[in-house]
Amino acid sequence: MIKNNAGDIHTTEEASCVIHHSNGDACEAEDVVIAEHFMEISVNGKPLARLSCTPDKLSELVIGRLYTERVIDSAEDIEKLFICGQGKLAEVTLKKDIEFAEWNEAEPTCCTGNKQYLSSGCKRKLEPITETVPKPEYVFELIKYFQNDSKLHVSTGGTHSAYIRTAAGDIFSFEDISRHNALDKAVGHILINGLNPKECMLYTSGRIAADMAIKAIAAGIPILVSKAAPTSEALKLAKQYKLSIIGKAWPDSYVRYLSKSGDEKTSST
């Protein structure tokens, strides 16, 4: 059962500023900035994480984060999810127990200071994905969608974006101050709506480092696309787990990194 009592929490705020020009001119103005929201997540009555995020699609964020961190095996593991009216507290009750003594806090690469909690004792291990090569027109479709969307980023310049493209061709968009959160919101949407992650493509506006590759692999999504470049560690993980990584995805070209691990499978994804 999902119960999100969070009301209309504004995702932007106004700020007074002075705009300086290279010719020496300056003028007072009002700017729009992203609203930074903080939410505590507790699991089975015990605090798990404190997230810095945008205050929208919080249910998707919580469920996606638990899944990509392998706390849960599926949305069915959640007995109840309650988010308070101010969106500052998310209480998750699972159908199984968690041994918190096994959990270690990992240093994040995200500049928002979000914490990731990984357990060597997780029941759900990372599993290889069926190697999949997307049709170029689908990749360029996502690139074009990003160019024409990202409403919060257009108004504030302060967010990352993530997009899910389903096998049916539907595209769903998510934004957050953290690229990790935006990706987790996308994964949460997949779980909440019963979509098959193996048939989805995932686009992120942020760089693909090892932590982002791990999230995509943990979610079972075979294709990860970014306007930015991947790191060497992300490519090593992609080779090991058959994740297709596409970087430098721009309107006129993109780079598909080869795993060199055998025959590739052309996909309708």
Image (cartoon, rainbow, N blue to C red):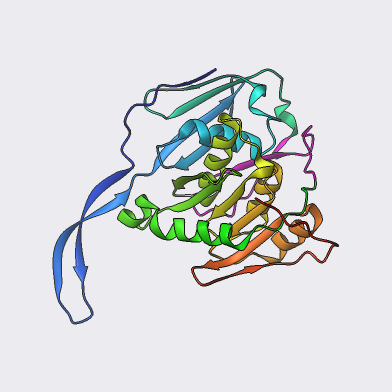
Does the image show residue 171?
yes
Q: Residue at x 46, y 60 (%)?
A: 144
Residue 159, x across and y down, in percent: 42, 53
**Label total for image:** 0
Q: Considering only vertical position in the picture, is 2 above or below 187?
A: above
Most distant residue in the bottom direction:
23
Q: Considering only vertical position in the picture, is 63 above or below 164?
A: above
Residue placed most toward the observer, 193 or 30: 193
Q: Which residues are magenta?
A: 103-127
> Horizontally, is 219 left or right of 264 in the view?
left
Q: Residue at x 55, y 46 (%)?
A: 169
> Horizontally, is 168 left or right of 178 in the view?
right
Q: Is residue 44 magenta?
A: no
Q: Quadrant of residue 184?
A: top right
Image quarter where the N terminus lies is top right
Q: Quadrant of residue 166?
A: top right
Q: Considering only vertical position in the picture, is 115 above or below 229?
A: above
> Horizontally, is 40 left or right of 97 in the view?
left
Residue 45, x across and y down, in percent: 59, 19
Q: Residue at x 78, y 64 (%)?
A: 259
Q: Is residue 124 magenta?
A: yes
Residue 87, x across and y down, in percent: 41, 29
